[in-house]
């Protein structure tokens, strides 16, 4: 009987050692790619204002991008694009210019392999002529 108890204890100890070794084994998964988002300054080509953005990565990944054009902080238009197994992805959007002086900005949002990252922004620095009637 003591032998049976010791055999069970040894079996349980072996299972615990195996489980512990599994928990402490370092992951061999590949590191996430290093990616950079860019928001270009919006530009005016009468009668529209255009916004371009791009994402570049050091290796292929599932890259998603949203480029949003804002006027005085309000969204005018946006475009979403997903690029599978690519190391770059770009998108553009546009909206009609309006009369008056506004601040136009391009916002670029990125998701890499399903993980979102903080957006980048670029805003126009010079006034434009009023929109054509």
Image (spheres, helix red, strand yellow):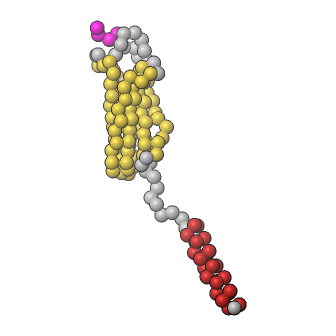
Q: Is 68 part of what is drawn in magenta?
A: no
Is residue 129 something that shows in the picture? no
Q: Main secondary structure of the magenta part?
A: loop
Location of the C terminus (image quadrant): top left
Q: Is residue 33 above or below residue 42?
A: below
Image quadrant of residue 46?
top left
Q: Position of residue 4 (x, y in %)?
A: 66, 89
Q: Position of residue 44 (x, y in %)?
A: 33, 19
Is residue 62 something that shows in the picture? yes
Q: Where is residue 93 in the image (x, y as percent from the top left)?
A: 33, 28
Q: In this view, does 82 lie above or below 120?
A: below
Q: Which of 90 and 84 is in front in this view?
A: 84
Name the residue rendered at 64%, 79% in the picture: 13
**Which residues lie in the magenta part?**
129-133
Name the residue rendered at 58%, 67% in the picture: 24
Location of the N terminus (image quadrant): bottom right
Q: Is 130 part of what is drawn in magenta?
A: yes
Q: How many marks?
A: 0
Q: In this view, does 127 lie above or below 76?
A: above
In the image as oriented, which residue stretches furthest toward the right? 2
Q: Where is residue 84 in the image (x, y as percent from the top left)?
A: 33, 48
Name the residue rendered at 60%, 79% in the picture: 14
Q: In this view, does 86 lie above or below 66?
A: below
Name the residue rendered at 36%, 51% in the picture: 60
Image quadrant of residue 88?
top left
């Amino acid at each position: 009987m003591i032998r049976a108890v010791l055999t069970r204890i040894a079996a349980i100890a072996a299972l615990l050692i195996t489980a512990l070794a599994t928990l402490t084994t370092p992951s061999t998964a590949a590191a996430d790619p290093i990616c950079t988002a860019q928001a270009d300054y919006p530009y005016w080509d009468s009668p529209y204002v255009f916004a371009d953005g791009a994402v570049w990565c050091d290796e292929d990944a599932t890259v998603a991008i949203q480029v949003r054009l804002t006027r005085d902080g309000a969204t005018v238009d946006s475009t979403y694009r997903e690029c599978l197994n690519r190391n770059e992805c770009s998108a553009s959007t546009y909206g009609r210019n309006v009369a008056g002086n506004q601040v136009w900005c391009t916002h670029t949002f990125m998701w890499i392999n399903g993980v979102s990252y903080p957006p980048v922004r670029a805003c126009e620095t010079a006034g434009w002529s009023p929109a054509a009637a």
